[in-house]
Image (cartoon, rainbow, N blue to C red):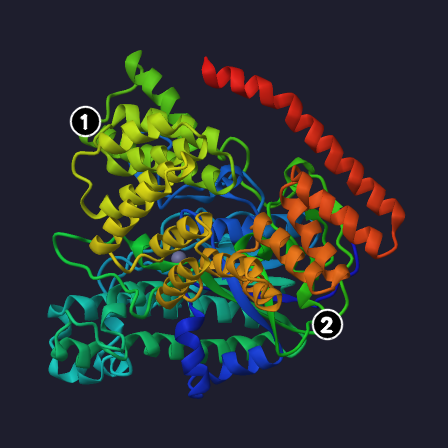
Amino acid sequence: MGARLAEKVLLIGWDAADWQIIEPMLSAGLLPSLDGLIRNGVMGNLATLKPVISPILWTSIATGKRADKHGILGFLEPRPDGCGVQPVSSTSRKSKAVWNILTQNGLRSNVVGWYASHPAEPIAGVCVSEHFARVQGRCEHPEPPPPGWIHPPQLAAELAELRLHPEELGAAHLAPFVPTIGDLQPHETPPVTGLRTVLARCASTHAAFTWLLEHQPWDFAAVYYEAIDHVCHAFMKYHPPKMPHISQELFDRYKGCVSGIYRFHDMMLERLLQLAGKDATVMIVSDHGFLNDHLRPVETSDRPVGPEGWHRHHGIFVLSGPGIRRDERIYGATILDIAPTILTLLGVAVGSDMDGKVLAQCFDQPPQVQHVESWDRVPGEAGMHPPDVRVDPFEQQAAIRQLIDLGYMQDPGTDTQKMVRHVINEARYNLASVHIEAGRVAQAANILEDLHGNDPADVRFALLLAQCCVLLDRRDQARRLIHSIANPGANAPQMQLLLATIDLAEGNSAEALRRLMLAEQAEPRLPNLHIQIGSVYARQRRWDDAQRAFRKAIEIDADAAMAHYGLGIVALHQRRDEQAAEHLLRAVGLMHYFPRAHFMLGVALSRLGWYDRAARAILVAVSMRPNMPIAHRYLAALYAKLGDADLALHHRRKAQHLLDLAREKQPLQTRSGVA
Ligand SMILES: [Zn+2]
């Protein structure tokens, strides 16, 4: 083990917490505990991953890995016996979570309510699965939590007592959220009954976690609260300012729910900080943000918006404790960075197979990061379920099908089969999105070909496959796919966007622009649309028009990284280098994995004479995308200016090597293109 930087680490998960809602509340003094924590530590955006689905994301937070490695691919999974579906479980996670790695290193963890933590794993410390807080049955005789909800089982009796049944909450408990609750019949008002259930679960989770902080020793403690996400899904449409389609009566009744749930979390935070003590290092994270302003979708009965449609790309990150910088903002953090950073804080090596990085900019002194190749390949007791319990529920289904076909097992019936098939398809669709985001487009396309082949009517499969085809330069196939969509509905603007991208790739920018204008008429508030329009103008070197389009995108979504990138490029061409650097910095701050933006930032900084910073920016770019000859040419020139002849020579050779490789490949590509 390396040097331990934190005495203990407290990780607090607030699903869907968003700075856009928090910042005005902080200014108004409504979140004093969070405010104190931020002043004593660092804060920043936490970029999420696609698809923006909570169980997948919280497992990425706990493992430092994308879903193709950790194996949790949605809310549901097929039951191992093939007789239906169940919530995703800890037995299907394919990779060690932080608490397993810590167990293996002799450290104790208390973990409460984490997604996909059921059944509770036999870790060093205590694990309370997310099923604990879901109290079923009547208030007087609640059902016990399902078997396996806690490890170690000796604590079951004590902790089960701490659960709160929704009916234990009365009007007085709900009044802080809905002040006119006294005039309502709570049991007849669905959003209020939902709120009651959410609050009861939240209180149960909090009670178990605070009990553990008080009574059980820990090196690492982690708790997951789902309430902000659930309250936002039910009540964000009533959050101020009033949305035009919401009645004044409902607005007045529910306008305080969202801010109420944030204040509730701030009160819980106060207690957590007390119990953790001054020496603890505290981290608060959310898996994504939540649309809360003029970008909120308008839901109608004939046009429902799925939960993902409300999620914003950036969640929150706060870190405070000994050795952590104070009152500073950090940039470029993603949810993949949480696990490596926690391990480093506790002096434990980071797995080189983790997809995230240690957030070194949070520390007063850059931490010494130790590495192991992969914790999954290090043998030893890690508090995991025994291997015969840990099964891949998806692979299992093929074996079950075979048993049914051979007559060894009874057919579960068509409805169950349909449900299982649906869950498998959703998981594969999500896996395809994971591959696309990680740049493995061909792998995604293979999965989507299959899904689309089996269900050509599903617009989502066709559209995502078309997107892959565009990225793979299979433009004819993409066009065929898009034209095959008979009822695009809400997806029509996205179809026009894709067709415009194809036109652009074929050099037909006039046609691309025509399509984009059409799409704009249908749905003027899509930031991506204006980014595309800006890109077309930029390609035509109409810089002023491009600038106007990118600005429009930013008016719609101030956090649109691509729009800031576009403004940076325009500024570079107009020789406004300082502004270019500002826009490009903003772009990489919002979206760290963005090699072109890091490269262009380097170009801007180099023009400003900041050679050292320029070289660093371009090094980030080539670490993300090693085969950019032009980036190495720039590095060679920069190191020559900085007086490092060896490095200059190294990068000049590298650039030449890459150019030679590209030249060797070219004739082959042309040949295959003709064939
Ligand atoms: Zn979430």
**Residue lying at 22% horizontally and 55% vertically, measured from the top left:** 521
Neighbour tally class for label 1: few under 14, some 14-19, many 20 plus, Cα within 10 Å: few
How far across and down, in percent of the image, does residue 117 sit? 46, 50
Describe the element under mark 2 as helix, strand or loop. loop
How far across and down, in percent of the image, does residue 281 sit? 64, 70
Quarter containing the C terminus: top left
Along the line of sight, the residue nearer the viewer: 395 or 163? 395
**Residue lying at 65% horizontally and 79% vertically, measured from the top left:** 278
Along the line of sight, the residue nearer the viewer: 362 or 194? 362
Along the line of sight, the residue nearer the viewer: 33 or 223? 33
Number of the label disc, if any, that sits on residue 414 = 1
Kindly identify which residue carries mark 2: 323
Number of the label disc, if any, that sits on residue 321 = none
Q: Up-down: is 413 above or below 107?
A: above
Q: Up-down: is 434 above or below 522?
A: above
- Image side of residue 625 versus residue 451, left or right: right
> Would you say residue 161 is visible in this rendering?
no
Dot 2 amino acid type: Gly
- From mark 2 to mark 1, how far is it between C-alphas? 59 Å
Q: Earlier in the sequence, mark 2 or mark 1?
A: 2
Q: Up-down: is 210 above or below 651?
A: below
- Image side of residue 544 versus residue 103, left or right: left
Describe the element under mark 1 as helix, strand or loop. helix
Neighbour tally class for label 2: few under 14, some 14-19, many 20 plus, Cα within 10 Å: some
**Residue lying at 57% horizontally and 59% vertically, measured from the top left:** 572
How far across and down, in percent of the image, does residue 610 sit? 74, 64
Count of all numbered marks drawn on residues in the image: 2
Dot 1 amino acid type: Thr
